[in-house]
Amino acid sequence: MNEVMFQKLFQQIQTLEKNMKQELNSIEEKMETKLRNIEVNMATKQELLSIEENMATKQELQSIEENMATKQELQSIEEKLNVIYKQVAENTEQINELTSSQKRQEKSLQILALRSIEQEGVIRELKYAK
């Protein structure tokens, strides 16, 4: 009986050992896959150096912060821009009016020039008629 129990125990141990090896192999495969993924996605030293070279220093960030406009300054600039936009609109309207007026004056000058030529012709005719 001891031998039968020993055999069963031995078989159970072998089965457990087999299952543990399979489980261990599965875990190793998963770990290798994860490690490969990490290696693929990991930055190289050169990439890290490039990133580091392109990063702003604390002094540069402080300089940027010191030179940045405040909300009040931006609001003031926006107000000034609005005034400028209004002035540009008014100037455009005035230019359009001046252009229109200039066209009317050009037409008037053409009419006056024609009348002057006609009158000059009449005066010559009168001169020669005498």
Image (cartoon, rainbow, N blue to C red):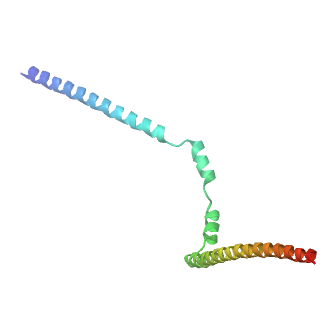
Residue 106 x %, y %? 74, 73
Q: Tell me the residue at 69%/77% (across/down).
A: 101
**In the image shown, does 128 or 98 lie closer to the viewer?**
128
Extreme residue toward the front, this view: 130
Q: Tell me the residue at 64%/67% (across/down).
A: 63
25 relative to 8 in the view: left or right: right
State the image quarter where residue 91 is shown.
bottom right
**In the image shown, does 22 or 17 lie closer to the viewer?**
22
Residue 59 x %, y %? 64, 64
73 relative to 32 in the view: left or right: right
> How many circles with numbers are drawn on the protein?
0
Residue 60, compared with residue 51, is above or below; it is below
State the image quarter where residue 81 is shown.
bottom right
Q: Tell me the residue at 9%/21% (across/down).
A: 4
Residue 51 x %, y %? 59, 50
**In the image shown, does 90 or 11 lie closer to the viewer?**
90
Quadrant (top left/top right/bottom left/bottom right) for the N terminus: top left
Quadrant (top left/top right/bottom left/bottom right) for the C terminus: bottom right
Extreme residue toward the left, this view: 1
11 relative to 126 in the view: left or right: left
